[in-house]
Image (cartoon, grey):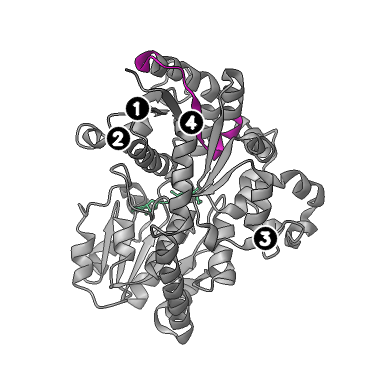
Amino acid sequence: MPPEKHVAICAFPFGSHPWILANMVGKLATAAADVRFSFLSTAKSNHVVFPPPSRAALIPSNLRVYDVGDGSPAGHHEASGDPRDQADLFLRAASANFQASVDTAERDAGRKVSLLLTDGLLTVVACEIAEKWHVPWVAFWFSAPHSLSMHVYADLIHQLRRNADDEEKTLDMIPGLSVMRMVDLPEELVMDPNMSVSCQMFRNLGNVILRAAAVVMNSFVEMDPEPLTADLKSKFSVLLHLGMLTLTPSSPLSLPASDETGCLTWLDSRGPRTVVYISFGSGPLSSPPPDEIMSLAKALESTRTPFLWSLTDRLKGQCLPGGFEERTGAHGRIVPWAPQREVLGHPACGAFVTHCGYNSVFESMAAGVPMIGRPVAVDQRICGKMVEEVWGIGTRVEGGVLTEGGMVKALEAVMRSEEGKAMREKAGELRRRLAEVAGPGGRAAADFKALVELISTS
Ligand SMILES: O=c1ccn([C@@H]2O[C@H](COP(=O)(O)OP(=O)(O)O[C@H]3O[C@H](CO)[C@@H](O)[C@H](O)[C@H]3O)[C@@H](O)[C@H]2O)c(=O)[nH]1
């Protein structure tokens, strides 16, 4: 007999988003074995997240993966160039492309879709499809809860933000956000909505997401400021907190954690808390400009700080000073991809230079490692601010950009000073707290059960 329920999952196929969604869906498919799940993303993203044949074998049997068009014009192999243009092309065609793939998925399953599960960034598209098909939809919010709140209050923010002088105004009219300023707003919220399809969609997101049957947060209710959580709870029909989806026990579909690049073995040979780990996330939009990468490299070389750097071959070729790898080979290592969670959890890891992506910040916190933040885009200013000003577990680089002098100071402060010791102690306290709330008795475990129930009965 075919499974009774059929959940279609719409992925936003950029950066870490499809990985985290796939990890979550892997867990849901295991927990709700009689529900059919159809995971829809671009061929390029599916090929990375579910590469054949080895990882494909790990996919639960009730989960099928379908390719959707990436929006590139007919005749082009795939959208190319600026990642923002790729996102725009994808979003422009997303509604039609998802609907076409769902038709195939429904034919394969012999069942109509009963629920749509979507990345929160696809809110406008998902709402349009779900309302057309008369099915409920659930949105996953993978970023900081603060940024969701900013989207929900976008109209109010836009009324109050009239000119450049307003940039330093705090957002104290929004519950739980009094520490944030206008200038910390995610850029997709402040971009001119007439610029592109994605700008329009992101600008409308906050109003439309209120119509979701449920919103699932990638955070722990116990870790978020109470006024913020209480306010969001009052706005949504159902608000669930599944904890950091990359932290809680992984499904077979979590990000690759194997140590193919030998990072952990290399760390084994280093002293406790001596190595600085560097990564600017999983997508090209989050990398600082080449001259800043160059300045960071110079600071690592001049201070002889042991380092492990996750840096793509392209950036390595473009941005490092000539002969850098040869000169620093005795104390540094560059790899194209690192098993980040394991690296941060290694005793040799003393600090993390990060773009302050939401997952990276929480992975560092879960490992008790202090951070040096260089926020680059989207929600990273918010996360950087939390790290430095609210949690006290790191510092942002001087002037907001990487310079050799600023980086030397930051390394000294975090790796070797009393200030750095205090940051590490606070990070250690948060690590213990996170371990407690992520456990089987925590709220995240109860909310996961509630989501499985919702999926199985909607
Ligand atoms: O060598 C590497 C590099 C990255 N990662 C993993 O990749 C993920 C990166 O996630 P995140 O830190 O959130 O960065 P982005 O991939 O850049 O994430 C995008 O999506 C996030 C969630 O919406 C936002 O917070 C960020 O600002 C946005 O850039 C983390 O789980 C890392 O552990 C590795 O495992 N190895």
176 w.r.t. 69: above or below: below
Marks 3 and 1, how far apart at CA: 39 Å
* Sequence order check, earlier mark of 2 and 4: 2
Q: Which mark is residue 227?
A: 3
Residue 167 x/y as whole percent = 74, 58
**Which secondary structure lies at badge 2?**
loop
In the picture of the structure, the residue carrying the numbered disc 1 is 65
Please tell me in which quadrant of the rendered image residue 415 appears. Answer: bottom left
Between marks 2 and 4 in the image, the one whose residue lies nearer the viewer: 4
Closest to the observer: 109 or 309? 109
Say what amino acid the circle numbered 4 marks. Thr
Q: CA distance from mark 2 to mark 4?
A: 28 Å
| Residue 132 sits inside the magenta stretch | no
Q: Which residues are magenta?
A: 107-124
**Distance from the alpha carbon under mark 4 to that under mark 3:** 31 Å
Say which amino acid is labelled 3: Pro
The residue at the point 26 percent across, 63 percent down is 333
Secondary structure at numbered mark 3: helix
Q: Nearer the viewer, residue 322 or 409?
A: 409
Label 4 belongs to which residue?
457
> Which one is in front in this view, the residue at disc 3 or the one at disc 2?
3
Q: According to the image, label 2 marks what residue?
A: 50
Labels 4, 1: front one = 4
Q: Earlier in the sequence, mark 4 or mark 1?
A: 1
CB atoms of marks 2 and 1 within 8 Å: yes
Q: Earlier in the sequence, mark 2 or mark 1?
A: 2
Measuring from the top left, give residue 117's x and y in whole percent: 49, 33
Is residue 322 something that shows in the picture? no
